[in-house]
Image (cartoon, helix red, strand yellow):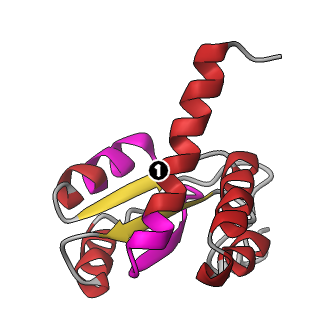
Amino acid sequence: MPSAEKLAKKQKYFDKLVDLCVNTPNALIICADFVASTQMQDIRMELRGKAQVLMGKNTMIRKALEMGHLAHPDAGMDVLRSNIRGNIGFIFATNCQLDDIREVLAKHVRDSAAKSGQMAKANLGLPAGP
């Protein structure tokens, strides 16, 4: 059984996610695969005051959306919950438009190094060697 401190921290996260989903009509669901921590930090700093970036574990996000659906059945959180797969996060537009957020994200796109076991995002053809 988790400690009371951990339970309070999780409840705070649940409340924050449900509140943002209900009260912020504009949001982006982002995929955070191949994103470095410095990239995320730069994005968060640039969006500070304009939008709120919220990342979390999928199980916690699903549980928060389930609790939110019970409290607000007409908010559509059940549809959102069914689409939670992979390494995702939310960017809620509090004081800007979604296009502004997309521009910030596009500005911080970087190439990532190839790692074993990962699928390439682009097709690559290698010529036959000797």
Instruction: Describe residue 94's horizontal placement relative to residue 59 as left or right.
Output: left
Residue 8 to residue 107: above or below = above
Residue 69 in view of the camera: yes
Instruction: Describe residue 25's horizontal placement relative to residue 66 as left or right.
Output: left
Of 113 and 130, nearer the camera is 113
Instruction: Describe residue 17's horizontal placement relative to residue 77 as left or right.
Output: left
Kind of residue indicated by mark 1 = Lys
66 is within the stretch colored magenta: no
Task: Look at the image and give the residue range highlighted in magenta.
Answer: 20-43
Residue 49 to residue 78: above or below = above
Q: Position of residue 31 (x, y in %)?
A: 57, 66
Tell me the SS state at disc 1. Answer: helix
Of 113 and 75, nearer the camera is 75
Q: Position of residue 84 (x, y in %)?
A: 72, 67
Q: Residue at x 38, y 81 (%)?
A: 26
User: What residue is shown with label 1?
Assistant: 16
Q: Residue at x 55, y 28 (%)?
A: 9
Most extreme residue toward the front is 71
Looking at the image, how many numbered discs can be counted on the residues? 1
Question: In the picture, which quadrant includes the N terminus?
Answer: top right
Residue 62 to residue 102: above or below = above
Q: Residue at x 19, y 65 (%)?
A: 50
Q: Residue at x 38, y 62 (%)?
A: 110
